[in-house]
Amino acid sequence: MKKNIFVVGMDSFNLEKLRKVPAAKECVFHSAIDIDEMRHVDKFDVEKLLSVAENRMRAVEGGPAGVITYFDFPAQDMVPILASRMGLPGPSFESVLKCEHKYWSRLEQQKVISKHIPAFCAFNPFDEDIFDSINLPFPFWIKPFRSFRSFLAFEIENRGQFEATLEQIRESIDFIHKPFMQLLQNQNLPADITQMKESCIAETPLYGRQCTLEGYVYKGKVKVYGVVDSIRDQHFSSFSRYEYPSSLPKWVQKKMMKVCKRFIRSIGLDNSAFNVEFFYDPFHKQVYLLEINTRISQSHADLFEKVHGVSHHQIMLQLALGDKPKPLGNKGKFRYAAKFMLRTFDSGKVVAVPSDEEIASVMNEMPGTIVKVLVKEGQQLSKMELQDSYSYELADIFIGANKRSELVDKYDRVIEMITFSIKKDI
């Protein structure tokens, strides 16, 4: 009898990736929560989502064998709770929160890897005289305790910019922060975290080359199996592509792994996938931890598939079943792979998107290339949900190559072949 695996945030793109991995042969996949039930919503009712998911899991004949997600809030927060309720393999909710709650995570990091994190402080955006409570020099970054895709994250260079940004934060922060804190208060967690009046963190900037470590913890043993470069565009505040494998020197990668393992062991995270974002400062030859997530990065799935022949959904699935993950192998069609994020930095209305014929031509000329269009004709970009604070993402383009330099060349060719038209707002 096949094993029932429940997905929080099931979508067609990742379901296709899941069904291709070897471990999927013994599994049948069910939606605990569909992607449309937790995206494009007016508000998050996480307790209701938990109840719906639990009822669906209990209703299936044979019961659940595992629960997974590859999405951020609220899915990432729900999985350890559902796993605990159903007696399934998974990390503790507290260890997950020590990664996902940006301020709590920094407090825990400060105990064991203090030389590898920025200066930081918490603040309440609704307080009077907030600026005086932030004891950091310009520039600094501000972001909510819980967010994703850089939602409400801003680099602040002066007091005027800070005051202007506060208006936007005050208007939108409750969208995620309020349901997040309600969820925390319903769990058995320290009161000094659950009763905080602050909702945002300020941090000194990190500079250098950025990358992400993909790994897992199984029965207390931490393993990093891939390092992906994160490359920003000329605006510097938004990513232009993820590139795998990393071109960073091996000694730098090993240093990052050492810091990563030290922190993960200290918080007791276990039976979980993770991805950790780092900066390498070549001037000081130092590495700094930006943030940690207790899931695979779905943005990297196609990169692993192109290089290894199997995506890291395989590792996520093996962990959910309580099994030790096996190496991904090296049976991919390409030596290098990248995910390019096609963006615009101006608000406007989408007038035209690539046709099916254009996308088919791309795939015919460059086999293995995927063009995932994220907008629709007639869509107003300013109304797109949870974009980063500086741009609007129009499409994701996944490319494989046997030379690193070919990745950008192929991307440039794709852009020549597809049509996006935006009528800018006046």
Image (cartoon, rainbow, N blue to C red):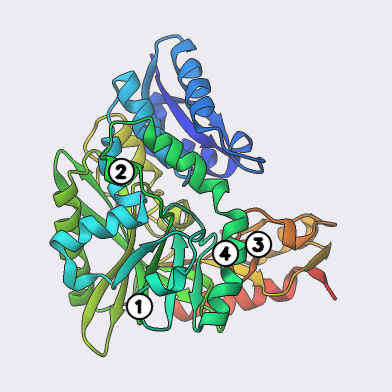
**Considering only order in the chain, which callout, 2 or 3, is on the residue closer to the N terminus?**
2
Callout 3 amino acid: Ala
Of circles 1 and 2, which is in front?
A: 1
Determine crowd level at label 2: few under 14, some 14-19, many 20+ residues with C-alpha closer than 10 A. many
The alpha-carbon separation of the residues under discs 3 and 1 comes to 36 Å
Q: Quadrant of residue 61?
A: top left
Front residue (pair 120, 14): 120
Disc number for residue 96:
2
Identify the residue at image location x=51%, y=43%.
178
Q: Disc 4 and disc 3: Cα gap in Å?
A: 14 Å
Q: Which residue is mark 4?
A: 388
The residue carrying mark 3 is 395
- Secondary structure, mark 3, is strand
Please give the name of the residue rendered at 14% of the width and 51% of the height, measured from the top-left corner.
266
Which of the marked residues, 1 or 2, is nearer the chain's N terminus?
Answer: 2
Do residues under tags 4 and 2 come within 8 Å of each other at their CB atoms?
no
Local packing at callout 4 (Cα closer than 10 Å; few below 14, some 14-19, many 20+) is some
What kind of residue is marked 2? Val
Asked if marks 4 and 3 touch (Cβ < 8 Å), the reply is no
Question: Dot 3 surroundings within 10 Å: few (below 14), some, or many (20 or more)?
Answer: some
Is 356 placed left or right of 325 in the picture? right
| In the foreground, 117 or 334 | 117
